[in-house]
Amino acid sequence: MFKSVLQEHNGRKAELRRQGDKARIAAISSAEALTSSLVEAVDSEVSKAFELEKLLSKEAKEARALAVKFKDQTSSWIAAARRADAVLREFGDAENYLRVIEGDMREVVRMLQQLSAAAEARQRPTTGTAAAATMASNADSVPGRAEGLPYRAQSAGSRAGGQATSAQELPGRAVCAVRRAAAGCPALRRAWAALSRDLLALLTRLRPAIMLDYVTHVPEQELCSLVQEVASLVPRAPGTEGVELFVAELDGCCYILRPDLVLERARDSSAVRWIAFAEEGHSTRCHWATDVQSEIVHGRLVAVAEQLRQFCASGCEDRVFRLGSCSGMPSAPIMPSLSGWLLGYPVAYLVDAANVGAAASWLSSADLALHSVIIACPLLQEAVGKAGSLSASSRADLDVLCSFTVPAELLSNGDSDVKLHLQNWVQGLCQGTNGGSAPNQDARSLLGTLWGPVRVEVDVSRHHVVL
């Protein structure tokens, strides 16, 4: 009986084991199916993201390649544009150079005609006494001869005895000479129009000196060559015979001087109204200089003019006159005073080594009235227009002869003497008498032919000076 029970039990146990194995296999299969389903669901999103990443990477590579290609193409366009610009510039320079050569050839033809006329004149009988009288008269008429200035040879046309260049031709000759002298110097080439105006002002007695503050980093030898080129290429019109130009330097800034006018200015002690500075405690005030102060500074400026006369008499055209070496004396005027006097201003600041600190502090904060001197030269504007293209503002700047400042508080006092002094100075510009002596008839005629009326524009806005 027990044996049958045991067999039955073992049979049921084996059946249960089979059912358990079957259930386990079914569960495993279900779990595997579930896992596969879950993995497939997740992998589909990841695969989509991966595909998108690969697509973006491919498009980024294509965009990068297009950018590199566009950069290369743009660089080629820029290079082509620069080559075209260089060709156009060379063409413009060649055109200007041909115009200069044309002017030079015309001058050569004129000189040959004048030489021929002079040769014919010499063939006609002339008494020795009359010839000597003519030579003496010509020597006496040369400006600066009586002042001890070195006599330089005049233009070939004047030496030949032919007709002098007319006043109408002088601006064109000045522009031609400046452009030719500035051809090898970029800084001078950029400022050729302003240089032409300033040099023409020197030749026609409008200014005793010009300051080249608008021309920087130019070797002094280039400026000496410019002066020599102007002296040799600009035929002397009536009223400019014997005019001499020299280069000067002061505190790193270069000037071009006309010594005869500077020496004339040195003889006139009332040419400048000086603005002096006085310290009162911890403050500084400005005032019109007293007669004693004006006489003292004038005496020192006369000493500077004497050294200039000696320099010119030495006959060294290739050297630069060092204005700084003239101010080595105690309390000598320095840059603002010496510069204002040289440039022919009617008003200048009296600054020396003793008051330079107070003057610099006051001028950097004070209100100053800017006086702009406007005088047009239609023939210069025409010559500049033919020589090269300028903007409207640059052409308008050619009419500004110079500018200077006066403290607004000194003008507001209503000093009648100051107003009369400024009016006389403007009148002297029109008549060419600001140097101190009246010009001859030819010089007055030249001045009236080339330049229009003078007007002074006053800007009462805030202007400051930095020493």
Image: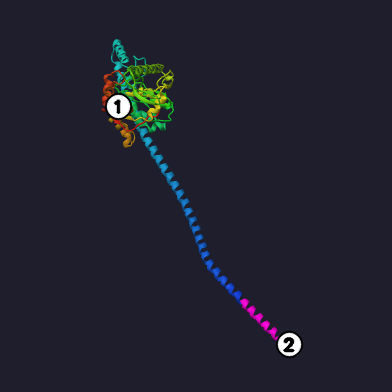
Q: Residue 5, how many percent across, how many down?
A: 71, 87
The quadrant in which the N terminus is found is bottom right
Q: Is residue 82 magenta?
A: no
Circle on res. 411: 1
Task: Residue at the far top: name it.
Answer: 129
- Towards the viewer: 104 or 148: 148
- Towards the viewer: 410 or 172: 410
Circle on res. 2: 2
The quadrant in which the C terminus is found is top left
96 displayed left or right of 417: right
Q: Residue at x 53, y 68 (%)?
A: 41
Q: Residue at x 62, y 78 (%)?
A: 23
Q: Is residue 22 magenta?
A: yes
Q: Is residue 194 above or below residue 85?
A: above
Examine the rendering and report whether any part of residue 225 can be seen. Answer: no
450 displayed left or right of 78: left
- Towards the viewer: 151 or 304: 304
| Label 2 with label 1: CB-CB less than 8 Å | no
Q: Residue 79, how many percent across, how many down?
A: 44, 44
Circle on res. 346: none
* Within-10-Å neighbours for mark 2: few <14, some 14–19, many 20+: few
- Towards the viewer: 202 or 289: 289
Q: Is residue 47 above or below residue 362?
A: below
How many marks are shown on the rendered structure?
2
Q: Amino acid at mark 2?
A: Phe
Q: Nearer the viewer, mark 2 or mark 1?
A: 2
Q: Amino acid at mark 1?
A: Leu
SS class, disc 1: helix
Task: Residue at the far bottom: name it.
Answer: 1
